[in-house]
Image (cartoon, helix red, strand yellow):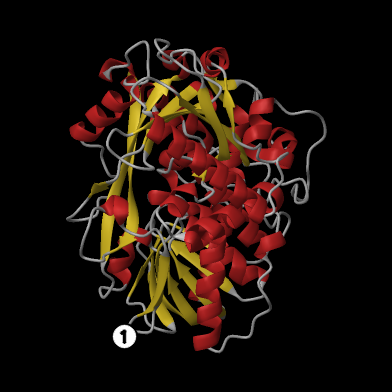
Amino acid sequence: MENPTALNAARRTADLNALADGAELDVVVIGGGITGVGIALDAASRGLRTALVEKHDLAFGTSRWSSKLVHGGLRYLASGNIGIARRSAIERGILMSRNAPHLVHAMPQLVPLLPAMNHFNRAMVRVGFLAGDALRIMAGTSSSTLPRSRRISASRVVEMAPTVRRDGLAGGLLNYDGQLIDDARLVTAVARTAAQHGARILTYVAASQATATSVRLTDQRTGESFEVKAGAVINAAGVWGGDIDPALKLRPSRGTHLVFDAAAFGNPTAALTIPIPGELNRFVFAMPEQLGRIYLGLTDEDAPGPIPDVPEPSSAEIAFLLDTVNTALGTTVSSSDVIGSYAGLRPLIDTGEGRTADVSRDHAIFESPTGVISVVGGKLTEYRYMAEDVLNRAITVRALRAGECRTRNLPLIGAAANPGPAAGPGNAPASLVARYGAEAANVVAVATCERPTEPVADGIDVTRAEFEYAVTHEGALDVGDILDRRTRIGLVPRDRDQVVTVAEEFLALR
């Protein structure tokens, strides 16, 4: 194979045909979110013959709707869950230093010290940040990767967050956590790295009738259906896991974010972090993001009933986020400033009681009466650990022959240690480096389109070469794949409308 990391329509067809013809498999993974692709990478890198199937696109579900944060587990430490806090800090360090240093960077989180925040709450935040420093040290993450927390002056607060309320501002508390350039890009990078190790990554393929050693696959694009056999079938379908194993009891929780032009917040350089009134260790974040945007989040609301493919924010959540952030601003942001919004469903384990905000974010592994092994719960930060855990279980209960887990030290495609098989020459624009890392120059070098370095539309910091690369190397099969997941242009409807025809142009050429 010329480029083992390249996912595209031709490779998908070849892999589907191979499976229909009886290619042998050790592991079938159901679900193309961060947990599923993490399992596929772990399995393939251990030498297991692996296929991943996803009924929509990579990162179609919860994995693209996060805050784009790689949390160090501070909140879980404060609530007494030392295990999750410790693992989160360790996994954050692995991502930032070994797996994906090109996709995860230190993000300053700024808590302004305003009159509404009493001395007790200020002390609690400061103690929490110091505990976070201790977690970072325990995890072996250097202060050059994640700077230590500190107090800063009022003038520095205003420099970092220009629209902050200034009356009575007594400085700020500054902490650092991990920030993804984009969650869907991480999913794509993990999937392509799994492909690099031999995994078959199949989007728009639905799974049904799953058992311990077999599953029926249906090509959503042609309607063709066939059964495959494997040593183990692992369900990583997240909030849709009950479709594969009805015995699973999940309690989805909706998290909502609003999208703004960064100018609405004065183009801040830190995530403005506002304590939620009356809550301990819960905050609303206004986070600077790629493409000149701010994402404001996050809610935690029960979401009972049928699971929608694309969840929608409620008007109450939108009002809550605006009201909370405005407690810390000198200028008011309103619904008219909101240029986009999104909501995702956390696949929490149903404990039958309490608020979703208080339900554990730990993961669990279940073996259903049919023999399917399911992993549910968990957090994006811990995807690698979750994958290792469930695969170890599958190897044991299904007596699979596999090597040791390698993913702690396995660089994803785009990391300096894994630039891809044909990294292109020359310098790439900073925006491309932020999204593709060491692979950035290759995105332009392999482009065959006209004007590859031109933006896809005026004012949108995505090049034509990136649209082409989404189709030729990242498995994009339709307009939504390009606009809503390989790039995040689609989060802002007015921007999406500008570039739909450009995306269609690239799909027509494949």
Could you say which is closer to the camera, residue 174 or residue 121? Answer: 121
- Three-letter residue code for mark 1: Pro
> Residue drawn at (38%, 84%), measured in percent from left and top?
371
Could you say which is closer to the camera, residue 344 or residue 216? Answer: 344
Image quadrant assignment for residue 450:
top right
Residue 441 picture location, percent across and down: 74, 34
Q: Is residue 116 left or right of residue 68?
A: left
The residue where tag 1 is placed is: 369
Q: Is residue 91 above or below residue 479?
A: below
- Quarter of the rendering occupied by the N terminus: bottom right
Residue 65 picture location, percent across and down: 40, 43
Residue 13 visible in image: no
Q: Is residue 221 above or below residue 452?
A: below
Q: Is residue 437 left or right of residue 224?
A: right
Q: Is residue 258 above or below residue 336?
A: below
Could you say which is closer to the camera, residue 483 or residue 331? Answer: 331
Secondary element type, mark 1 = loop
Task: Tell me the crowding category of disc 1: few under 14, some 14 to 19, or many 20 or more residues within 10 angstroms, Cα based.
Answer: few
> Residue drawn at (53%, 35%), measured in percent from left and top?
506
> Residue drawn at (42%, 63%), measured in percent from left and top?
362
